Amino acid sequence: MLRLPRFRMAVPPTLDEATRMLRDLGAHEQDPGAVGTLGLRVMAVAGGTDLYPNMKRRQFTPEVLVSLGRAVDRTIPSKTASGAGADTFRIGAGATLTQIAEHPVVRARYAALATAAGLVSTPQLRNMGTIGGNVCLDTRCNWYNESLFWRTAEGFCMKTHPDVVCRVATSSPRCLAVASADTVPALMVLGAWVRVRSADAEREVELAHLYQEDGMRYLTIRRDEIVTEVRLPVAEGWRSTYLKARDRGSFDFPIVGLAAAVRMDGRTVADARIAVTAVASRPILVEAARTALVGSRMEDEAIAAAAEAAFKSARPMDNTSSTIAQRKRTVSVFATRALRELRDGAAASAA
Amino acid sequence: MTKQLLTLRVNGETHTVAAEPHHTLLEVLREELGLTGTKHGCELGECGACTVLVDGMPVLSCLTLPTLLDERSEIVTVEGLARGPDLHPLQVAFAEEAAAQCGYCTPGILMAAKALLDRTTTPSREEMAQAIAGNLCRCTGYTAIYEAIDKAAERMR
């Protein structure tokens, strides 16, 4: 049996108690960049589908886990709201990926999100894993997501042991582990933001600002802050899609994930967004792709320019499956495919 | 660390067990309740061998902490499929179609397939593939498994 290390599980029944607990346990004082993943003594856990395997492999050995299962809302409204708050659609951070993938409003309005959620891992995992957990998913690397046996033989890396060099690029001053959450690029192109709560305050963070280019400190929020809700603009007129490359067709982490969304004004693109993941330590919103598309009629040339912009933004390192060249090229191919799909969909619905 | 008393509803019966708080549902089922039908494979959430149903939904018992489960949650393991001497149609069909070779993945696949057939008794091949996408089988190539699910579905209509 591959057993979890011993730890204490706290199960606060409310958000207030959960945030107080994280504050009192000193969660915010922990800097994973300084102490490494093994130095984290207090951690929050939602579905646990990524944390528990990592704990079993001894990438994390926290003394206390604060379970968010009872504290965080897990509902998704069955309809878009009317009246106050009608301009946003809220998803409780505790909603499972299955709930999101199957939700009629998400499928109808936020196709990229429904698709991305449905492509995360396996049906069993999606019944357990939450959207809040996926948004905060740990970064991944070939040198990190290995068994303790492998890492003991081959040598540890910076992410668990900050005094060791990055094994991907030994001169790198920072950890190069890869952002790997499927739902994040989808949420980014849909203009999502999250509500984040600590014992002292509550604030909203645009999804693009939730991440930074550092495999160890990949989230910009403090470790005593809890993502409580994902919010989406109503997205009238937007069409979106998500494409994923992975080793196994049935389930795997992305080696490239690309989401695209466009809003048409007649036959002209009024607004467009492309976001990619698994090609850097943070998910990337490709600003230049928007410039290439807005005002165009999604002619092949405009799509090619947007795909080129996405290609340039991707800077994969040799730390997932596949090769650097192939992953970069996949970004461009996916951007082209996604945009053609959206163009053809818009034309079909206009006809 | 001391053991903790847990109350679990497993296969329609209420059990109170003393278990280590860091032990997963898989460990509690196998080691405390003696229900060794649920297999431990990768134990990292990748292979699906440990699949059980919690309130009708397939989940991985190797990544479920029983301390976090609601006491009223209904857990069903492969031992809970048969009704007395009567096997579940899936079990009969799996035997008839030789849908198991080494058999290690079979309990997990049976549970994932049960969740599917509880939702629909007319699943398409695509729906079957989706339902057992999280269950690795290294022997059969899946064809016999699909045929067995088909056969069971037909008998359950």
Image (spheres, coloured by chain):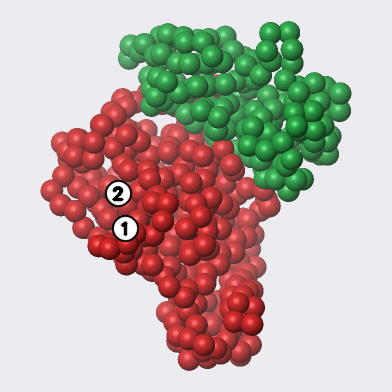
Chain colours: A red, B green
Q: Is residue A240 above or below residue A72?
A: below
Residue A44 has which mark? none
- Regarding residue A9, the answer to whether it shows in the image is yes
Q: Is residue A89 above or below residue A126?
A: below
Mark 2 lies on a secondary structure that is: strand
For the point 57% across and 33% down, the residue is B58
Q: In the rendering, at what x and y percent does residue B88 appear? A: 72, 20
Residue drawn 43% across the image and 9% down it: B17
> What amino acid type should be assigned to the residue bearing mark 2?
Thr
| Horizontal relation, residue A103 to residue A221: left or right | right
Residue at mark 1 shares a chain with residue at mark 2: yes
Mark 1 vs 2, N-terminal side: 1
Residue A127 at x, y percent in the picture: 51, 39
The CA distance from mark 1 to mark 2 is: 7 Å
The number of numbered badges drawn on the structure is: 2
Q: Closest to the observer: B68 or B74?
A: B74
Which amino acid lies under the numbered mark 1 shown in the image of this protein? Val
Q: Are marks 1 and 2 in contact (CB under 8 Å)?
A: yes
User: Is disc 1 placed on a helix, strand or loop?
Assistant: strand
Q: Chain of mark 1?
A: A
- For label 1, count other residues whose C-alpha is less than 10 Å away and answer few (under 14), some (14-19) or many (20+): many
Q: Position of residue A256 (x, y in %)?
A: 57, 62
In the picture, the disc for residue A194 is 1
Residue A93 in the figure: left or right of residue A245: left
Q: Which mark is residue A228?
A: 2
Q: Is residue A88 left or right of residue A342?
A: left
Residue A61 position, x and y percent, is: 37, 33
Query: Label 2 is found on which chain of the structure?
Result: A
Say which quadrant the N terminus of chain B sits in. Answer: top left
**Quick check: can you spot residue A164?**
no
Residue drawn where x is 60% and y is 38% of the image:
B46
Residue for point 45% across, 16% down? B8
